[in-house]
Amino acid sequence: MTERNAIEARNVVKTFGQGDTAVKALDDVSVAIREGEFFTLLGPSGCGKSTLLRAIAGIWPWWQGHLSQPEDFGARAMFLPQRPYFPSGTLREAVAYPQSSDGLEDAHLARALTRAGLAHLATDLSAEANWTQKLSGGEQQRLAIARVFLKQPAWLFLDEATSALDEKTEAVVYQALLDDMQARGGTVISVAHRTSVAKLHSDTWHMPSAPSAAIA
């Protein structure tokens, strides 16, 4: 039975391909994550970490099994991929995306950028650019993280969202994120390759090459 204010996915199965070429990425995996936990999935490439993360976040429906989420989960959740998207336009619009930047105070936007390690951009909110081309991979990931500080979700899903950062910078940014989420009683579910990231979380599950276990 699903605990109140928890995400629970049961008997998750995902197969890519058909017939003799079919590959089972997830095989009867079950997971329950309670509100307020900092949970990370570790494992080798191709073991199904990102597939499972997208399944429990509710943004990727092509799997079999059962998913339960808290009430009004969709309005309180945020997902950061490894390669975030930014619209061309002003920096203000890039930070606010996918919502409109109308009504957002410059001071709030600047503070979010500064907390994400982009203080040098905090005075350029009206600047226009193709931000995907203008910013480095690490800057793009930090700009996406600024969105978290701005929007303050209750449930945060991170799919190697800091992989382009060096280990020292990643630790600083991740800790700032976790401190922010903890202060609001939020939940963080991460996919990561680095054990240094896993150590920042309260719960870690090492996914095997062919997942077949139940976790809670």
Image (spheres, helix red, strand yellow):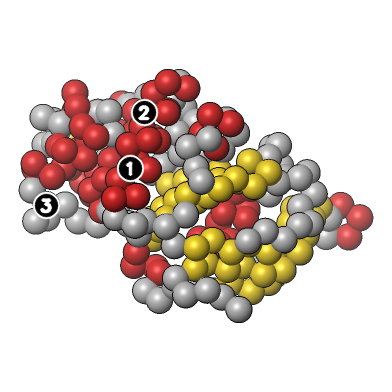
Q: Residue 179 carries which label?
A: 1
- Dots 3, 2 in contact, CB < 8 A: no
Q: What secondary structure is found at the residue carrying circle 3?
A: loop
Q: What residue type is labelled 1?
A: Asp
Q: Sequence-wise, which precedes: disc 3 or disc 1?
A: 3
Badge nearest the viewer, 3 or 1 = 1
Residue 60, visible in the rendered structure: no
- The residue lying toward the viewer, choosing from 108 and 14, is 108
Q: What residue type is labelled 3?
A: Leu
Residue 211 drawn above or below residue 145: below
Task: Give the quadrant of residue 176.
Answer: top left
Residue 110 drawn above or below residue 137: below
Q: What residue type is labelled 2?
A: Val
- The residue lying toward the viewer, choosing from 153 and 62, is 153
Marks 3/1: CA–CA distance: 23 Å
| Residue 189, image x, y percentages | 50, 51
Quarter of the image where the N terminus is located? bottom right
Residue 61 drawn above or below residue 122: below
Q: Mark 3 points at which residue?
A: 104
| Residue 155, image x, y percentages | 40, 58
Marks 3/2: CA–CA distance: 26 Å
Q: Name the residue under label 2.
A: 172
Q: What secondary structure is found at the residue carrying circle 2?
A: helix
Q: Residue furthest right?
A: 20
- The residue lying toward the viewer, choosing from 167 and 182, is 182
Marks 2/1: CA–CA distance: 11 Å
| Residue 121, image x, y percentages | 19, 28
* Left or right: residue 35 compared with residue 215: left
